[in-house]
Amino acid sequence: MISAFDIFKIGIGPSSSHTVGPMNAGKKFY
């Protein structure tokens, strides 16, 4: 299972997904 931290790292890594990653992760997990 993917942890929230892994998603944040993946989201912050790419410049194009640094905003979409954390936002989607927050909506799905929280």
Image (cartoon, rainbow, N blue to C red):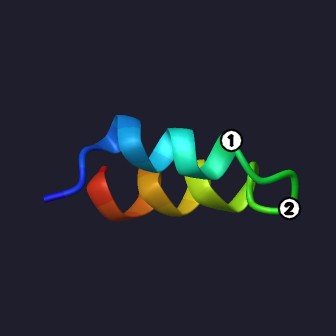
Where is residue 18 shown, x and y percent of the image? 75, 49
Look at the numbered discs 2 and 1 and tell me whether their residues touch, using CB distance below 8 Å: no
Question: What crowding class fits label 1: few (fewer than 14 Cα within 10 Å), some (14-19), or many (20 or more)?
Answer: some
Where is residue 30 shown, x and y percent of the image? 31, 50
Secondary structure of residue under mark 1:
helix
Is 21 situated left or right of 12 in this image?
Answer: left
Return the residue nearer the eye: 29 or 14: 14
Which amino acid, mark 2?
Ser
Is 10 situated left or right of 18 in this image?
Answer: left
Secondary structure of residue under mark 2:
loop
Where is residue 5 shown, x and y percent of the image? 38, 35
Return the residue nearer the eye: 9 or 24: 9
Whole-number angstrom distance, CA of label 2 to CA of label 1: 9 Å
Q: Residue furthest left?
A: 1
Question: Which mark is drawn over residue 3?
Answer: none
The residue tagged 2 is: 16
Q: Tally the marks.
A: 2
User: Looking at the image, which residue is at 86% across and 62% down?
Assistant: 16
Which amino acid, mark 1?
Ile
Instruction: Please state, as top left, top right, bottom left or bottom right, where the N terminus lies in the image.
Output: bottom left
User: Looking at the image, which residue is at 68% across and 41% down?
Assistant: 12
The residue tagged 1 is: 12
Return the residue nearer the eye: 23 or 15: 15
Question: What crowding class fits label 2: few (fewer than 14 Cα within 10 Å), some (14-19), or many (20 or more)?
Answer: few
Q: Residue furthest right?
A: 15
User: Looking at the image, which residue is at 56% across and 50% down?
Assistant: 10
Is 12 situated left or right of 14 in this image?
Answer: left
